[in-house]
Image (spheres, rainbow, N blue to C red):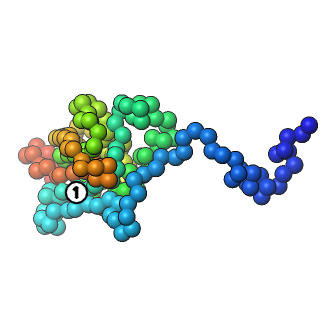
Amino acid sequence: MANKTDHMTAAEYQAMLKQTPKRGKTKAKWPSLPPGAIVASATTSSEAQTDNRDLITEIIIPGRVPGMNGPDGLIRMPHWKQKEIFERYQLLIRQATRNRHTPPVRIELIRHSIGRPMDYDNLVSTGKKLWDAAVACQLIPDDNPQVIQQREYSQQRAINRHTQMTVIRIIDLPLSPTNHDQDQE
């Protein structure tokens, strides 16, 4: 006997798919925000307009940023889901700012979560996709040690699951005399 899908029109097949119950996990649900809420926000210091070395960019990523470990950690996450998260971070960064930082910079990551505190190396891994997205958006030229000369990671307890967020801050550092001389040549 022939399979039911052998002689169906495209419209009939689409109707059949809509009636078929979905199995397994569906796509990740991002935290729902009230209408008019800021999805990602960026602040820039007022001095940045006069001296480019005083540029400070702060971006707030709503929701929980996955770490490396745990049941929904990056190490257990399929590649398509990691790509989806990366693209979401790129969109949030592009919506938040068009700033461009020049080396050297200092980065800060502050994770606000209701879960138990992460160990330090897992906390650092939460920034991996965020910093890759910042490079892809040209917020920073690269994420190597020559560009990012200082790093700080911290975590704070969130009040409830609706206040979970990750704050990333990028600060231009003063040029050292050797770097300043090379830039002028």
Judged left or right of residue 154, residue 144 is: right
Q: Determine if residue 138 is in view.
A: no
Image vertical order of residue 54 relative to residue 126, above or below: below
Q: Is residue 74 left or right of residue 59?
A: right
Relative image position of residue 5 (x, y in whole percent): 82, 45
- Please state which of residues 77 and 114 is positioned toward the viewer in this rendering: 114
- Residue 28 versus residue 89: which sits nearer the camera? 28
x 28%, y 49%: residue: 160
Image-quadrant location for residue 111? top left
In this rendered view, identify the residue nearer to me: 32 or 109. 32
Residue 56 in view, yes or no: yes
The residue at the far bottom in this view is: 36
The residue lying at 42 percent from left, 46 percent from top is: 86
Image quadrant holding the N terminus, namely top right
Please rate how many residues cluster around mark 1, counting C-alpha atoms within 10 Å: few if below 14, some from 14 to 19, many from 20.
many
Q: Amino acid at mark 1?
A: Thr
Along the viewing direction, whichever of 149 and 124 lies nearer the viewer = 124
Q: Position of residue 130 (x, y in %)?
A: 33, 46
Q: Residue furthest right?
A: 1
Please give the name of the residue rendered at 54% of the width and 45% of the height, measured from the top-left corner: 26
The count of marks equals: 1
Image coords of residue 106 (percent x, y): 18, 46
Q: Residue furthest front?
A: 160
Residue at image x 9%, y 45%? Answer: 176
Task: Provide the residue designation for mark 1.
Answer: 57
Q: Is residue 117 above or below residue 136?
A: above
Residue 89 at x, y percent in the picture:
38, 51
